[in-house]
Image (tube, rainbow, N blue to C red):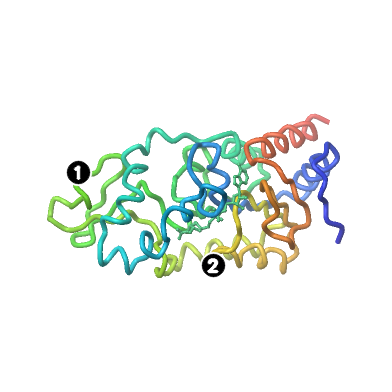
Amino acid sequence: MVKKNIDSEALYKEVARLMADRKQCVALTGAGVSAESGIPTFRSKGGLWEKYDPIEFASIEAFRKDPSKYWSLRGEFIKDYDRYQPNKAHLALAELEHVGIVRCVITQNIDGLHKKAGSKNVIEIHGNLMEIICLVCGKGYKAPHIPDGMPPHCSCGGILKPNTVLFGEELPVGVFMKAKEESASCRIMLLVGTSAIVQPAASLPYLAKQNGAKIIEINIEKAFPEADYFIIEKAGTALPRIVAEVNKFSHE
Ligand code: OAD
């Protein structure tokens, strides 16, 4: 397998041609796809886990002991939920779905930006910060409309928890099953802005590859050495370029 390292006109053309021919493309995205929307990643320079210990701030065990820690990490985003907007990368993925090339987006992100961008078939394997649930009565709240308080409480007095997967929690079975099915049956996997190291999401590109899919990585640095193509570029630059190339084919 020849690995493509060059960021060149030829690389974009080849990748776009492959996508237009094969279709059945699934995108697996991570924090890097939202970086250009002003949302920090976890492990890049200046990422969240440089400042916060993930086990102390984002594990289910820590949440049970002191929910205000997770709320101190996420509360501001939840209150500002409407302020964060999709960037060119999210919009390009939505466009690729619209033209019948991307079949589904599997995202580890909890910011809801793929849906805001117009992607229809989105599997949010780590949940979504928009949904807040009372751990006692199950009442649901929607960001940014949540009660004040640190941590916020439900009208019944119960603690509220964003409907996201914390470290130490299992992914919802049906949701991950769907992500596995999509990965095993796609013909191309676009791996966008993820360090691809957190399980079980990190197993999905291997599953795709084992079943014959080509892997196209878009990242500012190589994270998945087994990819067939590397586009070392910001997602908000690379994905619109791919859309432009794909559109040229449809006008040929
Ligand atoms: P990471 O922070 O681990 O990785 C972000 C990736 O995005 C890195 O590989 C960067 O090189 C890349 N990147 C940064 N800016 C980019 C840009 N503008 N365009 C393209 N790529 C860019 O984030 P994730 O892989 O999403 O889980 O992390 C996976 C999981 O770890 C998260 O869902 C979260 C975290 O702990 C939980 O909280 C359960």
**Which numbered disc covers residue 94?**
none
Q: Nearer the viewer, residue 75 or 164?
A: 75
- Residue at 82% x, 43% y is 11
Task: Check disc 2 and report the residue beneath it.
Answer: 199
Q: Nearer the viewer, residue 6 or 82?
A: 6
Quadrant location of the C terminus in the rendered image:
top right
- Tell me which amino acid carries mark 2: Gln
Q: In this rendering, would 35 be left or right of 191?
A: left
- Tell me which amino acid carries mark 1: Asp
As displayed, is residue 206 above or below residue 80?
below
Residue 235, percent across and down?
64, 41
Q: In this rendering, would 52 be left or right of 149?
A: right
Residue 129, percent across and down?
37, 49
Judged from the image, the secondary structure of the residue bearing numbered disc 2 is loop
User: How crowded is the residue under tag 2: few (<14 C-alpha within 10 Å), some, or many (20+)?
Assistant: few
Residue 218, percent across and down?
68, 48
Extreme residue in the left direction = 156
As displayed, is residue 169 above or below residue 242?
below
* Comes first in the chain, label 2 or label 1: 1
Q: Quadrant of residue 212?
A: bottom right
Task: Check disc 1 and report the residue beneath it.
Answer: 148
Q: Does the closest atom of ligand 1 sit within 8 Å of the Cβ of label 2? A: no
User: How crowded is the residue under tag 1: few (<14 C-alpha within 10 Å), some, or many (20+)?
Assistant: few
Q: Quadrant of residue 198?
A: bottom right
- Residue at 32% x, 56% y is 70
- Residue at 67% x, 67% y is 206
As displayed, is residue 191 above or below residue 198?
above
Extreme residue in the top direction = 251
